[in-house]
Amino acid sequence: MNIYLPLVLLITGCIFLAGCIQTPHTPSSESIADIPNNTSPDLQATATRDQVTPANLSEKPEQNITPAVTVMETRSPIATPTPDKNIRFRSQVIQNLTALQEGKEQVLNNWKSANTTELDQSVANLRHLIRNNNDAGSFPKKMDYVRLNYYDYIDRLTQFADNFALASERRNKGDNGSAYSYEKAGEMSGERADISEKRIITFLDDHPVLL
């Protein structure tokens, strides 16, 4: 019994291996081309028409495009507000007076510093300002009071400049007595000019809408 047992096991194993090894399944050799085409002629024609080639994509139908016409809305120009003539006149007069007063103060400061060169230059500058701002002929008729006091202011300021020019000349020559006299005359003229300036400003403040 023991002698045949290995032989039996060997035969059993061979049978088992033979059952596992099978012939591989070979797909049908029927060609795909031999498969009948069941698509009807109408469906084929429709499919052919519906095919879009790249050339067809590049072709765009002509379109008649009418350019849009933009209608520009006509608007009336915005009127620039004109400054009130009262304000305009007052501003001009005050501007002239301010420039002249600054020139007068510069002369006084240079006289006190005893700098002859700067004093002579400041007197020359003041005379230049007077020449450029001495015309009150264009003042409105309703501003006659301002015109009269403006002319008086210009006269007093001219005297002021002349007196300090002479005072500087006398002091340079060592004639301190005469220099002092012209200095006082110049200061008096300057004070009278200040009075006329104050009258002008007061009148403009009291009559803001006279024009």
Image (cartoon, rainbow, N blue to C red):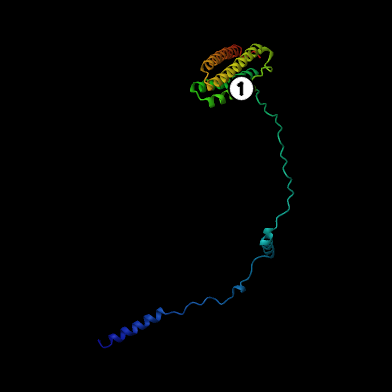
Horizontal and vertical percent position of residue 199: 58, 12
Taking the image as shown, residue 83 lies to the left or right of residue 26, namely right
Q: Quadrant of the C terminus?
A: top right
Q: What amino acid is found at the position of numbered circle 1 in the picture?
A: Arg
Horizontal and vertical percent position of residue 123: 57, 23
Taking the image as shown, residue 122 lies to the left or right of residue 10, namely right
Q: Eyeballing the image, is 66 above or below 96? A: below
Decide if residue 119 is in sight here. Answer: yes
Q: Nearer the viewer, residue 16 or 145?
A: 145
Q: Eyeballing the image, is 191 above or below 75? A: above
Q: Residue at x 28, y 87 (%)?
A: 4
Horizontal and vertical percent position of residue 60: 70, 55
Give the residue pinned by disc 1: 127
Decide if residue 51 is in sight here. Answer: no
Taking the image as shown, residue 9 lies to the left or right of residue 51, namely left
Horizontal and vertical percent position of residue 162: 59, 18
